[in-house]
């Protein structure tokens, strides 16, 4: 399970050096796609297969389901680490997330997230200021 947050940079060719803590997690390949709150999600291939199954299970007759699948799936891009542990982040995804040269690479259950430092800080502050509903966390903290 990937955890931690690491400030890194994306070079002028759109390549990100994967933090050492996350390299094993994506060593067999990965899928990059649009995420929520303006970040990018990076799924290892095994996790992506589970995501795909869930997306395929959404009803095609429901407009909201179709819109979500379109948002999430059409932005997806398959990638692998190169010999220098870099991954190329497609321009369309960088533009969507507002990624320039500075990026936060953060672990999350089953995925990584790529954030601009400003959006990352705002997301962390937002959770501190307005924590999730206590019912959602009832079994989280024992």
Image (cartoon, rainbow, N blue to C red):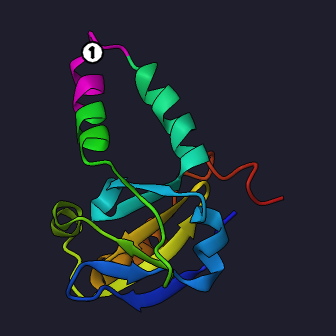
Q: Which residue is mark 1?
A: 62
- Residue 51 image point, x, y percent: 50, 37
Residue found 46% across the figure and 33% down from its top: 52
**In which quadrant of the rendered image does the C terminus lie?**
bottom right
Query: Which quadrant of the structure image shows residue 94?
Result: bottom left
Residue at 25% across, 78% down:
14
Residue extent of the magenta highlight: 59-67
56 relative to 4 in the view: left or right: left
Residue 19 lies in magenta, yes or no?
Answer: no
Left or right: residue 96 versus residue 142 is: left
Residue drawn at 35 percent across, 83 percent down? 103
Q: Is residue 11 left or right of residue 56?
A: left
Residue found at the very far top of the displayed protein: 61
* Residue 15 screen position, x and y as percent: 32, 79
Q: State which quadrant residue 24 falls in.
A: bottom right
Residue 121 makes an appearance in the image? no
Above or below, comparing residue 73 to residue 6 in the picture: above
Q: Between 74 and 120, which is closer to the camera in this rendering? A: 74
**Residue with the most extreme right position:** 142
Q: Quadrant of residue 8?
A: bottom left
| Residue 72 in view (yes/no) | yes
The residue lying at 23 percent from left, 34 percent from top is: 70
Label 1's element? Answer: loop
Q: Position of residue 139 (x, y in %)?
A: 76, 49
User: Could you tell me how many numbered marks the image carries?
Assistant: 1
Q: Where does the image place residue 56, in percent across and percent down from the top left?
A: 42, 22
Magenta stretch holds residue 60: yes
Q: Quadrant of the N terminus?
A: bottom right
Is residue 24 shown above or below 44?
A: below
Residues packed near mark 1 inside 10 Å, few (<14), some (14 to 19) or many (20 plus)? few
């Amino acid at each position: 399970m990937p955890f931690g947050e690491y400030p890194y940079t994306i070079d002028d060719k759109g390549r990100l050096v994967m933090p050492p803590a996350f390299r094993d997690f994506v060593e067999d390949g990965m899928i990059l796609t649009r995420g929520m709150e303006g970040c990018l999600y990076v799924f290892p291939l095994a996790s992506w297969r589970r995501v795909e199954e869930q997306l395929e299970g959404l009803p095609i007759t429901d407009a909201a389901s179709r819109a979500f699948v379109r948002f999430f799936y059409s932005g997806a891009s398959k990638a692998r680490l190169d010999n220098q542990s870099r991954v190329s982040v497609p321009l369309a995804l960088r533009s969507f997330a507002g990624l320039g040269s500075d990026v936060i690479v953060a672990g999350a259950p089953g995925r990584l997230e790529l954030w601009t430092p400003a959006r990352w800080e705002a997301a962390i502050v937002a959770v501190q200021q307005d924590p999730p509903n206590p019912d959602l966390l009832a079994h989280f903290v024992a």
